[in-house]
Image (spheres, helix red, strand yellow):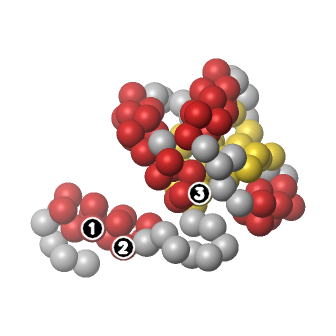
Amino acid sequence: MKAYCISDNTDTVMGMRLAGIEGVVLNDREAILKKLDECIQDPDVAVVLMTTKAISMAADVVANYKLELQRPLITEISDRHGSAKIGETIDSYISDAIGIKL
């Protein structure tokens, strides 16, 4: 099993390659969806890492894939600018689920 990175910038892909994870830089919705479909069809890909901006370009489709597919795990990662507020989003989900503000 392997991981694959779909990013909107070269810095993230280069960092992932240093960690042994292959990836691609894409900047339009159609290309992102095509590569994501290729990853889904590849039985060796277990995890797809996508930058926040890449996910936002195809958010509706990615959300459906996350709900419907058992494999691969599609995970959002922030880029080097750290513009995503993933931690705050996760805290919000947990707070809503358990009914206690974290």
Q: Quick one: 45 or 1, which is closer to the camera? A: 45
Q: Position of residue 30 (x, y in %)?
A: 58, 34
Q: Residue at x 80, y 46 (%)?
A: 22
Cα gap from disc 2 to disc 1, whole angstroms: 6 Å
Q: Which residue is mark 3?
A: 51
Looking at the image, residue 43 sits to the left or right of residue 56; the answer is right
Q: Which residue is mark 2?
A: 88
Q: Amino acid at mark 1?
A: Ser
Instruction: Assign a secondary structure to mark 2.
Output: helix
Q: Residue at x 59, y 57 (%)?
A: 51
Q: Which residue is mark 1?
A: 92
Q: Is residue 58 above or below residue 51?
A: above
Looking at the image, residue 69 sits to the left or right of residue 6; the answer is left
Q: Is residue 1 above or below residue 55?
A: above
Q: Residue at x 67, y 53 (%)?
A: 7
- Name the quadrant of the N terminus: top right
Q: Amino acid at mark 2?
A: Glu
Q: Are the residues at dot 3 and dot 1 in contact (C-beta closer than 8 Å)? A: no
Q: Is residue 7 above or below residue 90?
A: above
Q: Amino acid at mark 3?
A: Thr
Q: Are the residues at dot 2 and dot 1 in contact (C-beta closer than 8 Å)? A: yes
Single out the residue that lies furthest toward the left: 99
Q: Is residue 68 above or below residue 17?
A: above
Q: Quick one: 9 or 44, which is closer to the camera? A: 9
Q: Position of residue 78 (x, y in %)?
A: 57, 66
Instruction: Assign a secondary structure to mark 1.
Output: helix
Instruction: Assign a secondary structure to mark 3.
Output: strand
* Total numbered labels: 3
Q: Position of residue 76 (x, y in %)?
A: 53, 55
Give the quarter of the image for residue 29. Answer: top right
Q: Nearer the viewer, mark 3 or mark 1?
A: 3
